[in-house]
Image: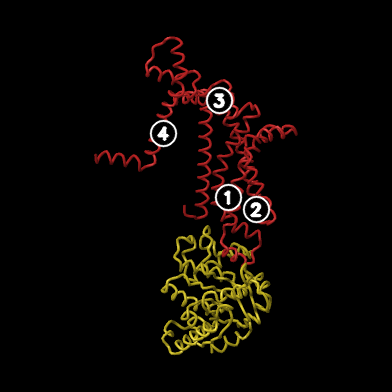
Chain colours: A yellow, B red
Amino acid sequence: MNESSSSKASQSTIIDISNLYLTFETQTEPVHALSDVNLQVNSGDFLSFIGPSGCGKTTLLRVIADLEKPTSGTISVEGQSPHEARLNRSYGYVFQTPALLPWRNVESNIHLPLEVSGYSKHEQKKLSQHYLSLVGLSGFEKKYPWQLSGGMQQRVSIARALSFDPGMLLMDEPFGALDEITRDRLNEELLRLWQETQKTVVFVTHSIPEAVFLSNKIVVMSDRPGKIIDIIETNFPKDRTFDIRETPEFLEASQRVREALKEGHNDGS
Amino acid sequence: MMEANRIFNNLISGSVGPVMILVTIIIMVWYAGAVYLNSSFLIDRYEKNNVNWSFSELASDSWSMERPVLPSPHQVAKELKRTIWDKKITSKHSLVFHSRVTLSSAMLGFVMGTFLGIGLSVGIVYVSALDRTLMPWIIASQTIPILAIAPMIIVVLGSIGIVGLFPKATISTYLCFFPVVVGMVKGLRSPDKILLDLMNSYSASKAQVFWKLRIPASMPFLFASLKIAIALSIVGAIVAELPAGAQGGLGARLLSGSYYGQTSLIWAALITASVISATLVSVVGRMERLINNRMGLQT
């Protein structure tokens, strides 16, 4: 019941990329970061880019976010150009590092995008309270970033990205720098957030279990030039827990991702 | 032996001990230097008058001369007491009066230099043409000896009718703006690319990036610069008082001291100037700590 209703709502395409190329001009030789990328992301998807370092997965995410301009090809985000989508604040971006401002406390860090967008003080307070409790950090409002652990800092960063209620959450290896225990816990929490907020999430990772556990669509990429090798769809229940990591379906999906990665690697060399 | 070690360790571990030791050494060297530098004049005089003299007489005479080459510490201390405590602060002989004159032009120059420096740094960071053209001139400005250009500025400004506090303050400004420009250019450029991307992802305006990111990030750089600038502002004000034949100020005091061979007067003015500078630097340091606390930064 839940499945069918949400799948119906998620049929609309929110990101549409076709024939996308991106070449960086460097002093020695041009670097082909992205080559012939074609991809549709549907509303409500949890989609992961996975691939070796330097395969352009972060670059692709940055193109969606309009932090990088493609050389050729077309891309639309929520039916508009990435530039317009950025101006409309249609996504929240979570970086590899928490990227908190050290001179602002937790609450005030979450207020940053709200201040920029012109929310009233009252709304800022209300929203920061709401999203801090959502990431389990109520009571930490007045702490400064240096007083928090790495995992807590990244939670603040996620709360900040959600605070202005964008339709999409773009996440660039957000848990890459964390220890595995913290990472597992944050993975489960992220899944819960995805379920509760109904956001579209585009997630970059180089961890196969993380990608398979979190995503309903896994985009496997190869390096030099960065292109899409395979798109693997999974159909795990939305309220899954880590128990599914022992199921044959999970292992099979992991195996498919691993093989696609290997294939991409062989192609590249 | 153990006991002596313990006492020695206590002495050098705190901050009072080492400072006291250093001050004692400086005073001892000073007294010895006074004997050494003043002795040739005294010995000449002894020989002319056929006086038999001992070393202790030479020492006590060299520490109490009317016009010594190097006055002894207690002579300078006496001069300080005479000109700071005993004179009315409105008197032309009061060091408080002269300090106020110097301080007011130094502070005006410091404020102008700080604003000029911040303004230039904003221009350099935001306008790439200024970045390429302005910096060489700013550096060149500091290679000109301040002693050479100070009279020029005073004379030029005086000839177009600008006299008094402002021309003197411009010399301080001339020295002050440089560390502020250098520090603030670095400070305004200090935010990581990731933070600029973050602001970009919120489609923040240039003004928002400036006030919410670049300015707070530049505070540590600003205060490092301000500490240098405020000490330079006193130097600038004193230098500005030298060529103009100024009626007041520590510079004028130094000048009249050297006219009349009143070395203790010169030393008293020098010590006053350095005490003022040190106080100002520590005031800036206090402001920095206050702002750091308000910004929640670790110090």
Of the image marks 4 and 1, the number of the one nearer the N terminus: 4
Q: Which residue is mark 4?
A: B23
The three-letter amino acid code for the residue at tag 2 is Val
Q: Which residue is mark 3?
A: B94
The three-letter amino acid code for the residue at tag 4 is Val
Residues tagged 2 and 1 counted as in contact (Cβ below 8 A): no
Between circles 3 and 2, the one closer to the viewer is 2
Q: Which residue is mark 1?
A: B183
**Which residue is at 42% across, 84% downward?**
A243
Can you say whether B129 is above or below B248 in the image? below
Under circle 2, the secondary element is helix
**Which residue is at 60% across, 47% downward?**
B180
Q: Which residue is mark 2?
A: B122
Residues tagged 4 and 1 counted as in contact (Cβ below 8 A): no
Kindly indicate the quadrant of the structure image that contains residue B169.
top right
Under circle 3, the secondary element is loop
